[in-house]
Amino acid sequence: MVTSPPDTRGQSAVHAVLRHAAYPVLLLLVVGTGVCAIVLEWDPAVVSPLFLIGVIGYFTALERIIPFNPEWHPNAREWGWYGLYFILTAVGAAIAQLLVTLLVGALAPTAPSWPAWAEPPVALLLGSLGSYVMHRLGHTNRFLWRFHGVHHVPQKVNVANNGVNHVFDIVIAQGVVQVSLALAGFSAPTVLAVGMFVTAQGYFTHANVDVGIGRLNHVLASPEQHRLHHSSNPAEAGHYGSDLAIWDHLFRSYTWAPGRVPAAIGLFDPTSFPRTDAFLASFLHPFRPRRRAANRATAPEPPA
């Protein structure tokens, strides 16, 4: 499916305003909610799902108002499948959180180890680095790719298919990052606040919205970068950072340039994974025996 930059001729004033305001509004909401979560010590079990619903609703609406590519809108059938995967993803996140709680209860410091002013930025940097490493391993490690590749089957990028994941991919990736943060001695409210930013960024980067962030692309992840990550062209499929772009620069997996868009979205080899609507086959795929000449569908190192 060929993509092209959106035609901005004749756009309404509302479109123009939303195109520039959508991301700053999101950041303000994240910061405001995060500060309240830390200061007021909000219960993560209540705040996290409400925040997630709000973010998904926000971008679902924007996708209809300022879409990047209208052909990427999910149809009714895809919404059904994406919803099923989303439930499975939520189950995986809950399992990861349970494992984190058990490990933290046994091993983590009983009191925060960081000054209050240092906690949020340091936790964000460490969590983002851990997420980058796990995501990159999900592409370059053959075993982990069996799970993560499920996410790259759809030939569209939109807020709905951000939830298309293998349950064990979520358990492994989120579990490692969350345990690392907790064992580093960060307080629960700080971990919650950082988690909200990561959640918002994850859905933002997948959103099918005509939003550009300009030079901020060199610091923060964006849909402009993440569409390249989902490209079916190995030469441009870098961008493993889902929240910050600095690690892609540091580890030379940054491929975006102004105006660069993927020619097509999906797996390098579309036959290497079951279709998204083959739900059971997708779940079982990682556990099936590998042929000796198994297809190497993982991403090679992007050009420097």
Image (spheres, rainbow, N blue to C red):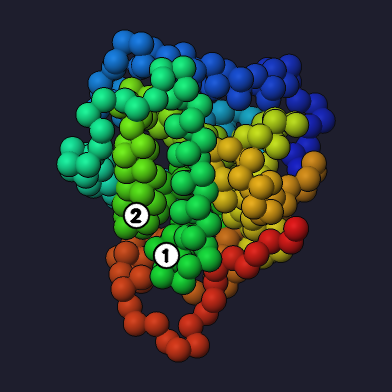
Considering depth in this image, is 278 or 295 the residue closer to the camera?
A: 295
Image coords of residue 51 (percent x, y): 38, 25
For the question of whether residue 86 can be seen, the reply is no
Q: Secondary structure at mark 2?
A: helix
Q: Is residue 98 left or right of residue 286?
A: left
| Relative to 146, residue 128 above or below | above
Considering depth in this image, is 76 or 92 the residue closer to the camera?
A: 92
Q: Is residue 53 left or right of residue 244?
A: left
Q: Earlier in the sequence, mark 2 or mark 1?
A: 1
Report which quarter residue 212 is drawn in: top right
Q: Are marks 2 and 1 in contact (CB under 8 Å)?
A: yes
Image coords of residue 297 (percent x, y): 54, 72
Image coords of residue 100 (percent x, y): 25, 43
Q: CA distance from mark 2 to mark 1?
A: 9 Å
- For mark 2, what is the residue? 172
Which residue type does callout 2 highlight?
Answer: Ile
- For mark 1, what is the residue? 144
Q: Which mark is residue 59?
A: none
Give the residue displayed 46% in from the left and 71% down from the top.
Answer: 142
Give the residue displayed 47% in from the left and 22% down from the top.
Answer: 118
| Relative to 288, residue 52 above or below | above
Q: Look at the image and tell me in which quarter the N terminus lies.
A: bottom right
Which residue type does callout 1 highlight?
Answer: Leu
Q: Secondary structure at mark 1?
A: helix
Q: Is residue 204 left or right of residue 214?
A: left
Give the residue displayed 76% in from the left and 43% down from the top.
Answer: 5
Image coords of residue 29 (percent x, y): 49, 17
For the question of whether residue 45 can be seen, the reply is yes
Residue reaching furthest bottom?
Answer: 292
Considering depth in this image, is 170 or 279 the residue closer to the camera?
A: 170
